[in-house]
Every structure is written in structure tokens, then in C-alpha cells.
Amino acid sequence: MSVHPAQTTDLDGEISIVVADDQALVRAGFSAILESQPGITVCGEAADGGEAIELVRQLDPDVVLMDIQMPGVDGLAATRRLLKDGADRPAVLMLTTFDLDAYVYDALRAGASGFLLKDTPPEDLVAAVRVVARGDALIAPGVTRRLIEQFVRSAPAAAAPDALAELTPREAEVLMLVASGMSNGEIADELVLSNATVKTHVKRILSKLGLRDRVQAVVLAYEAGLVYPGAPADDRRATTSG
């Protein structure tokens, strides 16, 4: 475990990051890429999940770049502990070698904001960090939803949570569109609403359902059978009465 002494506190506008990976060269590589970018600082590095948890408590970073498979406390267990009870910080980006991985799926369920392959191009790494640091989820319409669909397809539909009944018809409609992979802007165009209105609807949906971000909303929609794997976008939308 290492703390970067000159950067133990956030500067105005800075995105602070902890990098957790059991391979020193991987940590150094990701840190070098991120440190080269304006407005991003790596405040600490961890060799396993236990060290990552300790650094997060010490440094309160905005983002943790978390390898999913590490000795001792692995990335999944660390993510569950960091994000238990709907903690607002940090945002966790999982690092994995294989995109269709049950561990990644479980991490998304636990509240991780998305995942990246370890061979992700540097520009995509930086963009992903900026996305999750501002509170958005990294829910790529292709790979992330494909991951969710694969694991939901092999499991029976879970019972829809009672809180779904608290959604208004408009909120239920927005949830279906979120689950289909639409961005807020696309939802606004689809429903002829302002971006601000859609953002408010999404915020209320997450609050009512006790979810951290839209990744968890997508997982819930699939697991509860509100949308189903392999359907065209228009067919993913469930009808809601009331």
C-alpha cells in the first residue's frame, strides 16, 4: 500500500483516485496514465482489497480503480464493503481481463459504477474515470448490458421489489428506457421532455428503489423481468398501469 504524500487531500476540481491491483507494474501503468491528465490525481495505490478499503477510509477518494481478482480480500469483497448501505463515495470502476465474468456481474449488483477491461485504451480509461467521478454510471449499451443479459438469462426472474409500486407511470416508463440502454438525452428526445426533467425522474427512481446508480437500475429491471434479454429496444419496455 502506498500513499502519494503530496496529494493526500483533494484540490479544487481535482478527481482523486485510488488504484488497487496486485501487480505493481499494472498499478504504475494506470497511475502514470491518470496522473498525466489535467484535473486527475492518484492519491494512493493498493495491492489488495484490504489495503484499498484502508486507503479509502484514510483518503476519501472520488474513484477507486479496482482489480476484481486479487489475493486476500478480492475486488468484489472490497467493493461490497465500500458500497454497503448505499454509500455515496467512492465510485468504483472494476478492472477485469474478461468482460463476461460472473464476478463483474456481482460487482455491478453491489453498486460498482461500471467496469473496464485491462487492455482498455488510455483515452477510454480517462474518459471512464471522468464519467463515474461526476456521479454517472459507466453503462455501455453494448458490453455492460450484454454482461447483464448473459447472467440474467441463466437465472429465474426475481420477485419485483415492492418499491416498484411506488413509481409513477412516467417514472416506470423512464426506468424501462434506462434499462434499454438509453442515455438521459435519448430519453428526453423519446418522451419529449427536457434533460433536466429526465435527470429528476432518474434521481427519484433511484431514491425510491434504494439504488446507487443506473447500473443497478438496469440489473433490477432485468432480474425482476421488467425487461428481458435479447429483445429489441422497443419490446423491452413493460407497460405499467396506475
Image: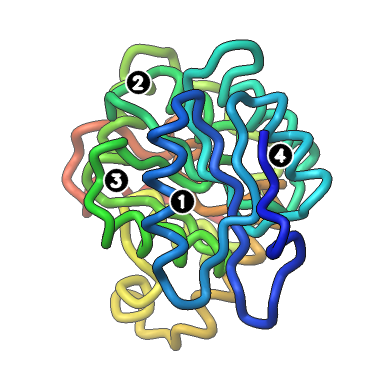
Q: Mark 4 against mark 1, which lies toward the viewer?
A: 1
Q: Amino acid at mark 1?
A: Ser
Quarter location, residue 114: top left
Residue 166 appears anywhere in the view? no
Q: Earlier in the sequence, mark 3 or mark 2?
A: 2
Q: CA distance from mark 2 to mark 1?
A: 25 Å
Secondary structure type for disc 2: loop
Q: Amino acid at mark 3?
A: Arg
Residue 80, percent across and down?
Answer: 68, 29
What residue does disc 1 label?
31
Q: Earlier in the sequence, mark 3 or mark 1?
A: 1
Q: CA distance from mark 4 to mark 1?
A: 23 Å
Q: Is residue 128 left or right of residue 150?
A: right
Q: Mark 2 against mark 1, which lies toward the viewer?
A: 1
Q: Residue at x 54, y 75 (%)?
A: 199
Q: CA distance from mark 3 to mark 4?
A: 29 Å
Q: CA distance from mark 3 to mark 1?
A: 40 Å
203 in relation to 27, above or below: below
Q: Residue at x 31, y 19 (%)?
A: 153
Q: Residues within 10 Å of mark 1 (few under 14, many from 20)?
A: many
What residue does disc 2 label?
101
Residue 158, percent across and down?
Answer: 53, 22
CB-based contact (under 8 Å), mark 3 and mark 2 = no
Q: CA distance from mark 4 to mark 2?
A: 20 Å
Residue 175 appears anywhere in the view? yes
Q: Residue at x 38, y 23 (%)?
A: 152
Secondary structure type for disc 3: helix
Q: Decide which of 81, 124 is in the foreground and name it.
A: 124
Q: Earlier in the sequence, mark 4 or mark 1?
A: 1
Q: Decide which of 201, 139 is in the foreground and name it.
A: 139
Q: Is residue 230 left or right of residue 227?
A: left
What residue does disc 3 label?
236
